[in-house]
Structures are given as structure tokens and as C-alpha cells.
Image: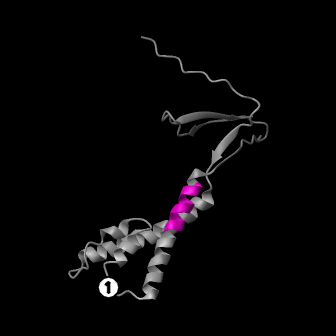
Amino acid sequence: MPAAAPASTAFDSSRPVTVHRMKRAYVTSGAVTFGISWSLAGMITLLSLSSEGGHGNPLPILLPVAGPFFYARMFEHLSAREWTLVGLWSAAELVGGTLLVLGIKGESVPARHRSEGGLTIIGLVPEISPRGTGLSLRAQF
């Protein structure tokens, strides 16, 4: 049985060709901020699980953003300074996660063509598409 031919789509030449670009600065700063604050939560969880006289289950601290508040509620009589630190820790996780998502979301920018000494550049580029295919052919003239 012959394979089905791929569906063809009409090319709309009135719209500019755009490409998706991640915002690398957002991805980097978000990954660092979220990674440091969340790894702190992981270290506290490991230390709490390995200590003998724990204050309850420390696993809720691993929840992003809300985890530090859940963990702080296990202790009695926290001062205003300690609640402020818990709030700043949670805010750091929120800011880091938000920057990471915004950076991955990126933006669509018009495609630019560049010529390197009059040579044509052709290459296979990894791509994620709605059907889950993995490569696209790109040519630059």
C-alpha cells in the first residue's frame, strides 16, 4: 500500500516569514535564579530528612513558590524577619520561573537572510512541530 502524500499548504507571500527566537538572557537568568533558590530547598529537605529530631514532613518545601511558606508553617513563633526571608525566597522562585518561561516562549521575528561570500548555506535544523517531527531544511542564499 503506498504511503499517503503529505498535505500541501498554500504559501501566503503577503505575510513576512518569521522565525521563533528564544530570549537567551531570560532563559539564563531564570534558570540560574530558579535553580539556586530551588536547590536551596532541596538541600534543606535532605538535611531535614537525615536529621533525627525533625519538625514534620519537609517534602512540601520542594513545591515551587508556595513550598517555603508550607515549610515555615511547621515551625512555631517565627519572627517578622524570618517571614520576610521566607517571602523573599518564594519571590526568588517566582521570578526565576517567570523569566524561564518568558525566555522559552520567546518571540517571532522576521527571518533575515545573509550571504557569506556569495555562498549558499543549506542545513538541517532540529525543530519541534505539532506532529512531533524533528528536522527542517533551511537554505540561505
Quadrant (top left, top right, bottom left, bottom right) of the N terminus: top left
Name the amino acid type tagged 1. Glu
Q: Give neighbour class at mark 1: few <14, some 14-19, many 20+ (Cα, 10 Å).
A: few
Q: Residue furthest top?
A: 1
Q: Quadrant of the C terminus?
A: top right
**Residue that numbered label 1 is attached to:** 76
Query: Which residue is pictured at 36% across the width and 70% down the height?
Result: 61
Tell me where residue 35 appears, x and y as whole percent. 47, 66
Left or right of 92? Residue 76 is: left
- 12 over 109 or under it: above or below: above
The magenta stretch is 94-103
Q: Nearer the viewer, residue 24 or 92?
A: 92
Residue 105, image x, y percentages? 58, 51
- Magenta stretch: dominant SS? helix
Instruction: Compare residues 80 and 40 and report the one nearer the observer.
Output: 80
Q: Reply above or below: 129 against 4.
A: below
On whether residue 78 falls in the magenta region, the answer is: no
Q: In this rendering, does residue 1 appear at all?
A: yes
Callout count: 1
In this rendering, the answer to whether 96 lies above or below 82 is above
Return the x and y of residue 104 as percentages of the image width and height: 56, 53
Whether residue 32 is visible here, answered yes or no, is: no
Residue 85 screen position, x and y as percent: 46, 81
Please name the residue shown 50% across and 66% down the image: 94
In terms of secondary structure, where does tag 1 sit? loop
Extreme residue toward the left, this view: 52
Q: Residue at x 40, y 73 (%)?
A: 68
